[in-house]
Image (cartoon, rainbow, N blue to C red):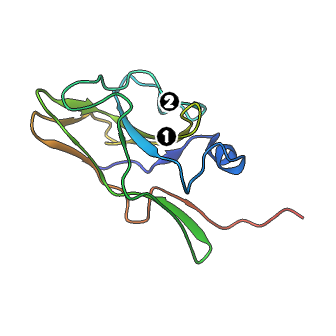
């Protein structure tokens, strides 16, 4: 199984630029969605998307906060990254097709990016007592690089 790259939502750069989302201080959550969700629609702007996994089986609606979030510049490239996210199934299975990151600090819970967790596409399932781990790419979740100012 291969995961797609994280895809940023269209309004995310605007939210960074106008200060709606503060990459240095906001808390970012990861939520899980079913195959019937519309969270892959890049014009969406705020959490929640349709058909999030229910608050059950070890998953809580609104997901969980990302740990070890970084927003770092090196050699002209800025990288947004975090530790891998782990969901543990309890008293049933956690089933999801998409993961979504949003600012849980910004008023309105503005969206950052989503990921199709298996590009077959297929659902990912963690059965009772097992874990569903969303492993972040070694290059980070998102990068901002290059470009020149218009003259």
In which quarter of the view is residue 10 placed?
top right
Q: Position of residue 31 (x, y in %)?
A: 38, 36
Label for residue 47?
2
Examine the rendered structure and indicate whether residue 115 appears above or below residue 51: below
Q: Secondary structure at mark 1?
A: strand
Label for residue 139?
none
**Distance in Å between CA atoms under marks 2 and 1:** 7 Å
Label 1 Cα crowd, 10 Å radius (few <14 / some 14-19 / many 20+): many
Name the residue at 47% across, 26% down: 49
Which residue is more in the foreground, 41 or 44?
A: 44
Quadrant into which the C terminus falls:
bottom right
In the picture as drawn, the residue positioned furthest to the bottom comes out as 75
Report if residue 33 is visible in the image. Answer: yes
Label 2 Cα crowd, 10 Å radius (few <14 / some 14-19 / many 20+): many
Report if residue 1 is visible in the image. Answer: no
Return the residue at label 1: 102
Q: Position of residue 52 (x, y in %)?
A: 37, 25
Q: Position of residue 121 (x, y in %)?
A: 32, 36
Q: Position of residue 27 (x, y in %)?
A: 47, 46
Q: Are marks 2 and 1 in contact (CB under 8 Å)?
A: yes
Whichever of labels 2 and 1 marks the residue nearer the N terminus, that label is 2
In-image side of 90 versus 104 (left or right) = left
């Amino acid at each position: 199984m291969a995961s797609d790259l994280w895809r940023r939502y269209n309004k995310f750069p605007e939210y960074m630029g106008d200060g709606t989302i503060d990459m240095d201080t906001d808390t970012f959550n990861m939520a899980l969605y079913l195959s019937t969700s519309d969270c892959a629609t890049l014009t969406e702007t705020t959490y929640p998307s349709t058909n999030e996994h229910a608050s059950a089986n070890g998953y809580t609606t609104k997901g969980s906060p990302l740990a070890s979030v970084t927003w770092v510049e090196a050699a002209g490239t800025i990288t947004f990254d975090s530790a891998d996210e782990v969901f543990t199934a309890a008293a049933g299975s956690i089933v999801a097709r998409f993961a979504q990151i949003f600012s849980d600090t910004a008023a309105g819970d503005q969206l950052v990016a989503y990921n199709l967790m298996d590009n077959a596409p297929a659902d990912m399932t963690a059965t009772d007592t097992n874990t569903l781990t969303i492993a972040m790419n070694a290059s980070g979740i998102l990068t901002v690089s290059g470009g020149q100012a218009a003259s």
